[in-house]
Image (spheres, helix red, strand yellow):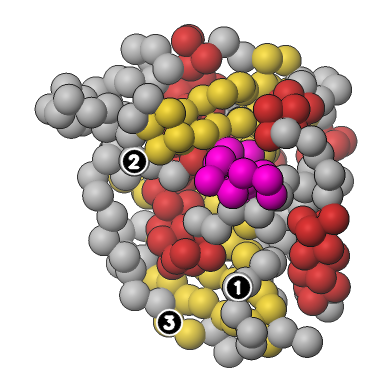
Amino acid sequence: MHKNTTKQAWLLALALIATSSGTLAQASEQFVGAQGFRTMPIEQLEGKRYYAATRFPAMGASAFLPDADLPAPVRAMLILDSHEGVLPHVRYLVNYQPTSEASAPDSTRYFVEITRFNLGPAVHADLVGSVPAKHLASIKTFGEGPHVRWRFAMSPQRGMAAGLDAVSRKQISAKEAQAMDCLGQPCTQLASNEGPQGRWKPQQITPLPRSFKRTTPEGPVPASIVEQLLAWMGEDAQRTMPFAPDAQRLVFVIAANASGQERQTTGLARNALVFDDAVGTQWLRFQQVAGMPPEAHTLNQRRH
């Protein structure tokens, strides 16, 4: 399933070096304004609905906004969920590119694409055969809402590490969602992907600042898992490269309560461009079941 990982990393490196997308402003316009996407009003996305005390308990405790230091994909996920509403059974596919122009290496812009899959109807259908009808909740309880894809162009601005430059949204059909790949597994498949085979090493959980509410009765907030995975990637996830429209350099797949009746949150991430002479691809995974302590592992695949 992962035999092409080395080839993908090599092609990615070539794409990042050879791409000629003009200025980052032009790249942002093309990325966010792609066919089928509808531009979202930034002033509404950053309104009271987003900056709610339920999401940011420390709101107003400082002169700075509580999300001022959040990495781009983390803030983007929180904004998406604040607009779409939280789903109890969900999977996120996050593609993240920190970029800069070759002619202006100090310029920085973050490109984030998030596809959110509503797995509620599939989980309900999966339980129909094993749970008596009188004990099975209605399908509405499992979460209502379409599959959606959001695109964010972000940059450091006005005291924000990842301020919004432009945002767009597109609804994804069930057929399109079923055909999408989440790091080697169909995105709408209920079972969570554990990544390639290899000698996975335990990873220590990194303490994170209490920027936002990181846990709910259903488990860890998915955006918090992405921040944890980014922290483990270290400087690699902060280095900028020229923008490449089709690159998949930093990819995250986060699933919450995707299968079974027990609460479970999983995360799988791949860094396809490691700045290391020996490592070609870095994989990270996270898992937390019900009230148990989280577990994390990393796998470094050698460069060929």
| Vertical order, 168 against 125 (above or below) | above
Q: Please provide percent x and percent y for residue 158.
A: 37, 25
Give amino acid for label 1. Phe
| Res. 286 in view | no
Write the start and end of the magenta stretch as one range. 97-112
Asked whether 27 or 77 is in front, the reply is 27
Mark toward the viewer: 1 or 2: 1
Q: Main secondary structure of the magenta part?
A: strand
Distance of label 1 from label 2 (alpha carbons): 24 Å
| Res. 57 in view | yes
Q: Which residue is mark 3?
A: 202
Q: Which residue is mark 1?
A: 275
| Vertical order, 288 against 146 (above or below) | below
Task: Judge the density around disc 1: few (<14), some (14-19), many (≥20) Cα neighbours within 10 Å.
Answer: some
Q: Residue sitting at 62 percent across and 23 percent down?
A: 167
Q: Please provide percent x and percent y for residue 175.
A: 87, 36
- Badge 1 marks a residue whose secondary structure is loop
| Vertical order, 220 against 199 (above or below) | above
Q: Which residue is mark 2?
A: 69
Give amino acid for label 2. Asp
Asked whether 179 or 189 is in front, the reply is 179
Q: Please provide percent x and percent y for residue 139.
A: 60, 29
Distance of label 3 from label 1 (alpha carbons): 22 Å
Residue placed farthest to the left in the image?
61
Give amino acid for label 3. Pro
Comes first in the chain, label 3 or label 1: 3
Mark 3 touches mark 2? (CB < 8 Å) = no
In the picture, measured across the screen, residue 37 lies left or right of residue 133, that is right
Asked whether 104 or 273 is in front, the reply is 104
